[in-house]
Every structure is written in structure tokens, then in C-alpha cells.
């Protein structure tokens, strides 16, 4: 008898560049970068969802979203990877091919890379959200080990992307380039910027307009993601001895299910989207004076439906922050997500935790599937708990009343 148990899905956030009043680059046939990249991003999202990932877009339609907001979206979804999709452009129509970029903490890897980053960074100025100081090349970046590690991962993801894109389009440069892209500044999420092709090249513009080609590009990027961060395979628990550790149940606990950001069905995505639009729309209408006045960040995250207290109190435990902890490590230890911890504790930033702080943690239920020959004493011993605790949490009246394939909840160990 086999039972499939699915692990938590990896989260990929795809960022279609530009949008709204910022069209991005424009092709000779007036094809707009913002439209093409949105189509590719949608294809990529759908492809990833079909292959076992959770994938989300930073914008779902033709409206402008600030860099800050795009990165906040990545955080809210608890992204493991962040990909910004663009098309390149050059005054010479002969320029062609794809290129992939990561954030540079020092200088750009070439003058062309520097110029490209500069032009992509203009987006916030066109969209009217730049605050004048973060968009300069000389803006200080906090260099820490986490960020260095993230950039190394980003480079690996970039290399995989170039490798797979090669079968669809000739690369302009076959190595991952570096430059100071505003959008790639998430310090702890592997992020790349993909310039799919030159929209200024008539032939590539023609290709970019084709749905089958958009799909091919998306498939190539999806394969790269598959190489870099394979979707977790279902764990097959054989109904025999030696299930080494408790299994994580596929079904998220009730609180998470009611959470509009965590849930990934269409209805939820719409909720999130409209909230994003609300956050974005007023910005467009602002006058310059209002814009200048509104320098302090005030946008709040999308409104969330609160789970009933009776539900949420049940499986929330407190975790005491230790030296050297950061949200990712805490999430991993507790079989939960950064996103869930941030929301549960109303954290506005990942850096808002300090040693000794007690964080509410919502851990998924761990289970043991009862096998032939199991008894409660054995199970309790294996998971370092007590028979009484097992009976209580599973509402078992008599210790002999367990049956094969029964899914026993395990008390949260801490
Ligand atoms: Zn662009």
C-alpha cells in the first residue's frame, strides 16, 4: 500500500517588465515590450504551474507597478526565485539575441550592460515612482554574505537559463552579465533579468509577436528553473517499516487555506491583483506636487481575510528567535514559509526580527501513517512524544483503536 505525500511547492515570481504608461522598448512594427513580456510571463506561469510549481506575476495586466511594489509582491508570495522578463533594444536593427543579467554589487560587466541597466532603471521615472535617490548607480548597497550567496545562486540560475534559451534563440553573449538593476535588489531571493530578444531587430520582433515562439521561450526558461530548482517529487511512503521521519502532509492547515495570499487558486490571485491595482492606481493620478509630498512609503499589503480565532489558536506555536536565525532558517526549521511567519507576526520586513523575540509559527501538521504491526507506544517513542499526547490530538479513546493506513497527527515538537 503506497501513500503519496506532496511536499510544499517552490514559488516562482515572474516580473513582466514595464506596463501602463511605461511601454518599454518599441519595435519597428510598433510592438511594445510591455505587451510581449506579459504574454511570455503568462506562458511561463502556466507552464510552471503545470509542472509542480507555484508561480505568480508581479502584474497581471497593462498597468504600471513600481520596482518597490514588484519586489514586495515577490516577498508576499514567499518567492524562491524571481525572474524579470524584458526585451532588448538598440539603435542598430542588426543587434540580436538574448542575454541574462544578475545584480552587480560592484561595477557592470560591460559598458553595454551598464547602459542597459540604466535604461531599464528609468522605468520608475517614467512610471512616476522614483524617489530620486535609489536610482543612481552610486546608491550604496549593503553587502553582506547573504546577498553574495544570493547572487551566486542567481548566476547559476542565469547560466541554466542561457543554456536552455540557446535552443530557441541565439544568445547575444553566452555568459551571464552583471549590472546594477534596481529590480534585482532582493537581498535573499535568487533573481535574474532576462532580455529575451531584441524587439528592435525586425526578425526578432516578428518572432516575439508569435504565440508559439512566446511559448517556446517560456518552456526554455521553465526548463532552466527545473534544472536549478527542481519541483519536489511526491514522497512515496511505502506501508512498511522505516519511515525515517514524519511526513509533511500536502494539505495546508486551515489558517493557511483561508489566507488569500498563500492560496493559489484563480479567485485568490484576483483578490491579490485587485489589491495591487488599488495600490498602484492612485499613484498614477498623483500630481507632481502630491508625488513630492508622498515620499514616505505608505502602501499597505493587500487586505487579508482573518481566519477565525478558534482555528488559528489551535496549531500556532511560539518560536524564540536565536542568534544567527533569519526568517528562512526559522521557516525551514518549522516546516513553514517565510510568508506565513511574516503575515502571522505582521512583520513588514524580513529584517524586523531580533534575538529573543517570540514569533508565532504556524507549522503544517505532521502525520504518521499507521502500518501493520504499529502500536501507539512504538509510534510515540519514534516521534519522541507520549501515547497520551497522541491519543489526545487524534481523539483516540482506546489505545488499541488504531488501524492500518490511519493518518495520525503528531504533536508539534519543539
Ligand atoms: Zn525592459
Image (tube, rainbow, N blue to C red):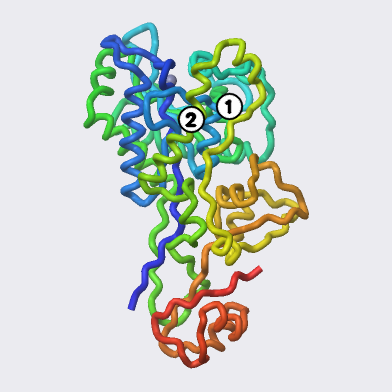
Disc 1 versus disc 2: distance between alpha carbons? Answer: 33 Å
Residue situated furthest top in the rendering = 91
Q: Is residue 202 above or below residue 174?
A: above
Q: Quick check: 149 above or below 89?
A: below
Label 1: element kind: loop
Q: If the image is split into quadrants, where does the N terminus sit?
A: bottom left
Q: Which quarter holds ligand 1?
A: top left
Name the residue: 32% across, 42% down: 46
Q: Residue 141, position in %: x, y?
A: 67, 27
> Residue 129, how many percent across, how many down?
56, 19
Along the line of sight, the residue nearer the viewer: 132 or 207: 132
Determine the image quadrant of residue 315: bottom right
Q: Of the two numbered discs 1 and 2 on the same chain, state the one appearing first in sequence.
A: 1
Q: Which mark is residue 278?
A: 2
Give the residue number, with chain letter if any, for mark 1. 104
The answer to whether residue 175 of the structure is visible from this angle is: no
Amino acid at each position: 500500500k503506497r501513500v503519496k505525500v506532496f511536499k510544499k511547492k517552490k514559488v516562482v515570481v515572474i516580473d513582466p517588465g514595464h506596463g501602463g504608461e511605461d511601454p518599454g522598448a518599441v519595435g519597428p512594427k510598433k510592438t511594445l515590450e510591455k505587451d510581449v513580456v506579459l504574454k511570455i510571463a503568462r506562458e511561463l506561469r502556466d507552464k510552471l504551474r503545470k509542472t509542480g510549481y507555484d508561480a505568480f506575476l508581479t502584474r497581471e495586466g497593462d498597468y504600471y507597478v513600481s520596482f518597490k511594489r514588484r519586489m514586495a509582491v515577490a516577498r508576499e508570495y514567499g518567492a524562491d526565485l524571481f525572474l524579470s522578463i524584458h526585451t532588448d533594444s538598440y539603435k542598430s536593427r542588426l543587434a540580436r539575441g538574448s542575454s541574462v543579467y544578475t545584480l552587480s554589487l560592484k561595477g557592470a560587466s560591460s559598458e553595454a550592460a551598464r547602459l542597459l541597466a540604466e535604461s531599464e532603471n528609468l522605468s520608475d521615472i517614467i512610471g512616476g515612482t522614483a524617489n530620486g535617490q535609489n536610482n543612481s548607480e552610486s546608491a550604496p548597497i549593503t553587502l553582506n554574505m547573504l546577498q553574495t550567496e544570493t547572487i551566486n545562486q542567481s548566476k547559476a540560475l542565469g547560466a541554466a537559463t542561457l543554456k536552455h534559451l540557446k535552443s530557441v534563440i541565439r544568445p547575444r553573449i553566452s555568459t551571464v552579465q552583471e549590472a546594477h538593476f534596481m529590480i534585482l535588489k532582493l537581498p535573499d531571493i535568487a533573481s535574474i533579468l532576462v532580455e529575451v530578444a531584441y524587439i528592435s531587430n525586425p526578425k526578432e520582433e516578428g518572432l516575439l509577436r508569435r504565440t508559439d515562439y512566446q511559448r517556446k521561450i517560456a518552456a526554455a526558461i521553465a526548463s532552466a528553473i527545473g534544472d536549478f530548482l527542481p519541483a519536489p517529487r511526491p514522497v512515496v511512503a511505502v506501508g512498511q517499516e522505516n519511515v525515517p521521519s514524519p511526513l509533511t502532509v500536502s494539505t495546508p492547515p486551515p489558517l493557511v487555506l483561508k489566507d488569500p495570499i498563500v492560496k493559489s487558486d484563480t479567485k485568490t490571485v484576483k483578490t491579490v491583483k485587485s489589491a495591487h491595482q488599488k495600490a498602484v492606481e492612485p499613484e498614477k493620478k498623483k500630481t507632481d506636487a502630491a508625488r513630492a509630498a508622498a515620499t514616505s512609503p505608505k502602501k499597505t499589503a493587500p487586505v487579508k481575510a482573518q481566519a477565525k480565532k478558534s482555528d488559528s489558536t489551535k496549531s500556532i506555536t511560539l518560536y524564540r528567535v536565536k542568534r544567527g536565525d533569519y526568517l528562512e532558517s526559522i521557516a525551514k526549521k518549522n516546516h513553514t514559509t517565510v510568508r506565513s511567519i511574516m503575515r502571522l507576526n505582521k512583520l513588514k520586513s524580513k529584517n524586523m526580527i531580533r534575538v529573543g523575540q517570540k514569533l508565532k509559527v504556524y507549522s503544517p501538521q505532521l502525520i504518521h501513517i499507521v502500518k501493520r504491526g504499529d502500536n501507539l507506544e512504538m509510534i510515540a517513542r519514534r516521534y519522541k512524544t507520549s501515547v497520551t499526547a497522541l491519543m489526545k490530538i487524534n481523539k483516540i479513546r482506546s489505545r488499541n483503536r488504531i488501524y492500518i493506513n490511519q493518518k495520525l497527527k503528531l504533536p508539534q515538537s519543539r
